[in-house]
Image (tube, rainbow, N blue to C red):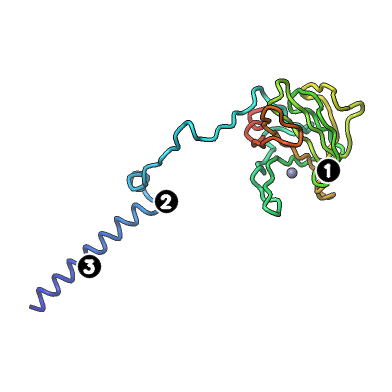
């Protein structure tokens, strides 16, 4: 009787250990790819018609700070910036006075001084759907004015730390805003410039 009970307990123990092994195979992200892939719930893609789609602007961008290569950039688009704000831009570190150049061609729509951005430039690209935003500038390039056309790669200002930027860490704050028809320079929806600059020159 005792012998039968012992065998039964042993069988239960083996079964339990086996079950734990199976669970571990499936649940660990570092486990065998096939085991975890089999156990993952199927991904349900949202219907194509309701998925948000923000197209990327056409054309190849130039890194908007002279002398900085695409591989020197880091992605700071999703960084927190206090009071629930996110960055929605890329910061490109460079010594004060370094030339800021137009990432894309367009028309200077607004030269604006703001508390957060400091000295800023808004350039609307041909077609009107995209606005490039340059902030924390130390100054504007001589002759820059609202309504003026700028060519891609043309110097438009100098890197600085005006606005909400540390004087010890001058940088260009660069953003790309997708504009709905009729939206003004202060509006638009930010898209991440990082992958576009990374693929640029
Ligand atoms: Zn920034």
Spatial distance from mark 1 to mark 3, Cα to Cα?
Answer: 70 Å
- Secondary structure found at label 1: strand
Q: Residue under circle 2?
A: 30
**Rendered image quadrant of residue 57:** top right
Compare marks 1 and 3 and give the one earlier in the sequence.
3
* x then y, percent, for residue 54: 59, 32
Is the C terminus in the top left, top right, bottom left or bottom right quadrant? top right
Pick the front one: 186 or 172:
186
Spatial distance from mark 3 to mark 2, Cα to Cα?
Answer: 26 Å
Residue at image position (83%, 43%) is 114
**Rendered image quadrant of residue 60:** top right
In the image, taking residue 97 as reference, residue 11 lies left or right, namely: left
**Rendered image quadrant of residue 101:** top right
Pick the front one: 131 or 78:
131
Residue at image position (37%, 54%) is 27
Compare marks 3 and 2 and give the one earlier in the sequence.
3
Height in image: 58 above or below 98? above
- Residue at the front extreme, as displayed: 182
Q: Are marks 1 and 3 in contact (CB under 8 Å)?
A: no
Residue at image position (81%, 23%) is 150
Q: Residue under circle 1?
A: 114
Picture quadrant of ligand 1: top right
**Which numbered disc, 1 or 2, marks the residue closer to the eye?**
1
* x then y, percent, for residue 197: 67, 31
Q: Residue under circle 3?
A: 13
Height in image: 43 above or below 142? below
- Secondary structure found at label 3: helix
């Amino acid at each position: 009787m005792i012998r039968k009970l012992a065998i039964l307990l042993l069988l239960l123990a083996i079964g339990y250990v086996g079950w734990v092994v199976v669970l571990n195979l499936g649940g660990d992200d570092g486990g065998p790819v096939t085991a975890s892939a089999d156990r993952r719930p199927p991904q349900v893609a949202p219907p194509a018609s309701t998925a948000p789609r923000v197209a990327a602007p056409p054309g190849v961008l130039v890194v908007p700070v002279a002398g900085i290569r695409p591989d020197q950039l880091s992605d700071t688009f999703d960084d927190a910036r206090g009071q629930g704000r996110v960055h929605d831009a890329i910061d490109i570190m460079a010594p004060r006075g370094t030339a800021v150049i137009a990432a894309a061609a367009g028309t200077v729509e607004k030269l604006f001084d703001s508390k957060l951005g400091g000295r800023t430039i808004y350039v609307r690209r041909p077609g009107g759907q995209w606005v490039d935003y340059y902030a924390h500038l130390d100054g504007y390039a001589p002759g820059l004015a609202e309504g003026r056309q700028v060519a891609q790669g043309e110097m438009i200002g100098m890197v600085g730390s005006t606005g909400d930027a540390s004087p010890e860490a001058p940088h260009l704050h660069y953003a790309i805003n997708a504009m709905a028809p009729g939206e003004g320079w202060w509006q638009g929806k930010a898209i991440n410039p990082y992958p576009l600059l990374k693929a640029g020159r």
